[in-house]
Every structure is written in structure tokens, then in C-alpha cells.
């Protein structure tokens, strides 16, 4: 399932409709999924509530579960609304872009786990923020525009840094 389908499924559910009646000012701010060796977790969608500066997360499993009001750290930035219409490519297409760059630029750092977050970042706009947790205990991060597949950032960092 892709993000637009997940959003539609959630927003058409009774669980969401009841919650939305209580939180009419809320809006979609992120979509999250994690993948590992042909297994992926359920989509998690987050809705920001400006009135109390919290995010409510919905997990789309066999049933829809709600995780209420997690406080957020926003570092003086506005929490932007996701625009589902700006999602022009499937997650698999985005992951293919990541894989191609990883093979060319970071061939030693193959992913063991992949974390994918679609959100709006102040410096980059609406992006897929893809993080590989690599077999070499590194993190490889890509930020890719959701509407163009343009890679706007890539960076490799050691997950664990040893200091002498």
C-alpha cells in the first residue's frame, strides 16, 4: 500500500472520523514505515494538533490503532502539512533511486534495515527521508523530493563512534 491509499483508508475509517470530530484543526504531517529483509511494518500516519502542539499517530494494521498526543520537539520551525498530491512516485521508485546512489557512492554500506519517513522539512520541502541502517553499523541518509525524485541530500555517518 502506498501513502495516498493509506491516508484514504485511514480517513474513511470510523476510528479516524470520530477522532477528527474532536480534532477538526489537525492535519497530516508524516507517513512512516520500516522495512527489513522482505518484511515491512504497518504504515504509521501522524496528524499535528496546533492547539496543543502534539501529534497523534495512527497505525494501519489489521485494525487501526491510535497513539494519542505525543509531544513534539520542533526547534522553532512550523510543522507543515503533507500534500498527498505532491506524491508523484511510489515508495518503491524512491527506494530504487536510493539503491542506485548507494551502489555508486556507498557500495560497502548495504542496508540491513530501511526507515522511510515522508514529511516536510524546512530546508528541503516535502521529501522522503530514507535512512539505511547498514550492515557496517552506519547510517546512510537520503532526502528525495516526493514530486520529482530529486536527491537533495545524502550523507553517511557512523552509527557508533569510538573515541580514544
Image (tube, grey):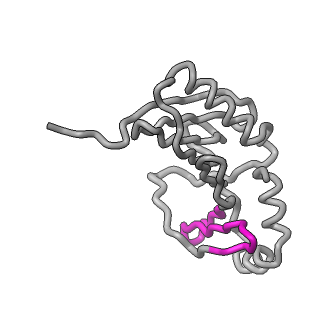
From the viewer's perspective, is residue 91 above or below residue 31?
A: above
Give the camera-side residue of 47 and 13: 13
Can residue 56 be found in the magenta stretch?
Answer: yes
Q: Kindly indicate the quadrant of the structure image that contains residue 156.
A: top left
From the viewer's perspective, is residue 137 above or below residue 152?
A: below
From the viewer's perspective, is residue 86 above or below residue 31?
A: above
Give the camera-side residue of 54 and 95: 95
x, y percent for residue 93: 74, 35
x, y percent for residue 98: 62, 31
Residue farthest to the front? 37
Q: Is residue 92 left or right of residue 68?
A: right
Looking at the rendering, the stretch of residues picked out in magenta corresponds to 46-66
Which residue corresponds to the image point at 14% horizontal and 37% vertical from the top-left?
164
x, y percent for residue 99: 62, 30
Q: Is residue 71 left or right of residue 55?
A: left
x, y percent for residue 63: 74, 74
Q: Kindly indicate the quadrant of the structure image that contains residue 163.
A: top left
Can residue 68 be found in the magenta stretch?
Answer: no
Residue farthest to the top? 104
Which residue corresponds to the image point at 48% horizontal and 55% vertical from the top-left?
74
Q: Kindly indicate the quadrant of the structure image that contains residue 50.
A: bottom right
Give the camera-side residue of 11 and 95: 95
Give the camera-side residue of 37 and 89: 37
Q: Main secondary structure of the magenta part?
A: strand
Amino acid at each position: 500500500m502506498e501513502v495516498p491509499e493509506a491516508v484514504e483508508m485511514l480517513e474513511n475509517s470510523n476510528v479516524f472520523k470520530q477522532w477528527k470530530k474532536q480534532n477538526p484543526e489537525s492535519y497530516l504531517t508524516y507517513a512512516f514505515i520500516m522495512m527489513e529483509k522482505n518484511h515491512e511494518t504497518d504504515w504509521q500516519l501522524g496528524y499535528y494538533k496546533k492547539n496543543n502542539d502534539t501529534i497523534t499517530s495512527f497505525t494501519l494494521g489489521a485494525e487501526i490503532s491510535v497513539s494519542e498526543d505525543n509531544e513534539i520537539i520542533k526547534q522553532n520551525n512550523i510543522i507543515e502539512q503533507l500534500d498527498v498530491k505532491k506524491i508523484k512516485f511510489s515508495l518503491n521508485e524512491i527506494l530504487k533511486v536510493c539503491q542506485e546512489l548507494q551502489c555508486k557512492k556507498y557500495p560497502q554500506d548495504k542496508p540491513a534495515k530501511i526507515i522511510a519517513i515522508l514529511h516536510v522539512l524546512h530546508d528541503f520541502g516535502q521529501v522522503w527521508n530514507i535512512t539505511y541502517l547498514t550492515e557496517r553499523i552506519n547510517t546512510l541518509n537520503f532526502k528525495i523530493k516526493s514530486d520529482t525524485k530529486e536527491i537533495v541530500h545524502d550523507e553517511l555517518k557512523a552509527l557508533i563512534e569510538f573515541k580514544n
